[in-house]
Each structure stands twice: as C-alpha cells, then as structure tokens.
Amino acid sequence: MNEQKENSPMGEQMETPKQGNPMNPMQSPMMQNKNVWLLAAAALLVAAVFLMVSGGIAPTDEAEEMEGEEMQEEEQVEGAALFSEITLNEQNNSGQSGAALLTDLGDGTTRVVISAPSPFENLQPAHIHSGTCENLGGVVYPLANVEGGSSDTVVAASFGDLAEGTFAINIHMSAEQSDVYTACGNI
C-alpha cells in the first residue's frame, strides 16, 4: 500500500493512506479506476441483454421500403458466430439463383456455403470478386466449384473484412465459359 508519513501534533510520525475513495480511504486510485471500468462493463452488458430480450431496435421506414429488393441478413446471437445470408440473383437468363451463407469462424476466416440449384450438370467456378455485381472486379478469393447446386469453402478473410469491403459472390457457367455469369450477389 502506498502510504505517506506525517508528523502528528505531538511530533510523532504517523502513516496516512494516499488520497483515494472518500468512502473508503484505504482504496487506491488504481482500484477506483478498476471499479469504474467494471461498472461501465456491467452497464453495457445490461444494455446488450435488454436489446436481445426486446428484439432490438424497431425497423425504420427505410427498411420497410426495401421489401422486394435484395435483402441481406446479419445475425449475432450470444455464443454463436456472426453470419450473413446473401441473395444470389440470376444473371444472363441462366435460370440459376440461390443464396450464400457467410459465417464468421472467429479465427480470421469465413465459411462460404452456396446453395444455388443449377440447370447445368457441369462444375461451375465460383469466386468472391472485388466490386459489385453491376461492376464486377477481379477474383479476390476463389471458392470451391458449384457442383449439383452447392459449394462449401473456408476463405482466409475475416467476416468483418468481407462485410465492410465491396465484394460480390459470382457463379460462372463453366471453366470453359467463365465469361458467362449465371448468378451473383453483393456482400
């Protein structure tokens, strides 16, 4: 304990504690700071539990207007991974559409599962491209080929990096016809 020496009116040396909590003069300023942080963390925890129990924040008019447009869903449940479902829209009258589920694995990687029933029997290359479906850039992360309408790949990118960047998931007709896009969805 940090103590200071003072002289009493009788000339004797006395030990007095450093200034700290006036309610507890024996508590150091460092302990006071720890208590403030613990109190703030407890308040945040109570707020988070309240939001989870109450169902979160009510939707805005803008969210209601988005009905019918491409919707993306992100979810965080305590003890579960963060995920997002991406709608894969048909391209070039291919007859192929579906969804991709991106799941944060928590170790800087993301699992990408594609479900896009295909009228084609061949393997279809799939990738995460830079840009958007409307303005597709180069391949950033190759994905496992779509076979029988599905693909499952773990990419070396965090969910946060994918969600905060400008990327799109694109499915190609075939390796031979990679310039023909059959389905695409913006992340």
Image (spheres, rainbow, N blue to C red):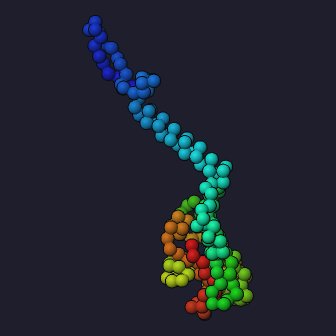
- Quarter of the rendering occupied by the N terminus: top left
User: In the displayed image of the protein, which residue is found farthest to the bottom?
Assistant: 176
Q: What percent of the width, then of the height, locates residue 67? A: 65, 71
Q: Is residue 141 placed above or below 55 in the rendered structure?
A: below
Where is residue 128, by image quadrant? Answer: bottom right
User: In the displayed image of the protein, which residue is found farthest to the front?
Assistant: 61
State the residue at coordinates (67%, 89%).
94
Towards the viewer: 63 or 184: 63
User: In the displayed image of the protein, which residue is found farthest to the top?
Assistant: 10
Q: What percent of the width, then of the height, locates residue 161? A: 50, 67
Q: What percent of the width, then of the height, locates residue 136? A: 52, 83
Where is residue 87, by image quadrant? Answer: bottom right
- Quarter of the rendering occupied by the C terminus: bottom right
Towards the viewer: 177 or 135: 135
State the residue at coordinates (63%, 86%).
91
Q: Is residue 81 placed above or below 162 in the rendered structure?
A: above
Q: Is residue 74 placed above or below 148 in the rendered structure?
A: above
**Residue 62 seen in the figure:** yes
Tell me: 84 left or right of 38: right
Count numbered badges in the picture: 0
**Residue 145 seen in the figure:** no
State the residue at coordinates (66%, 75%).
68
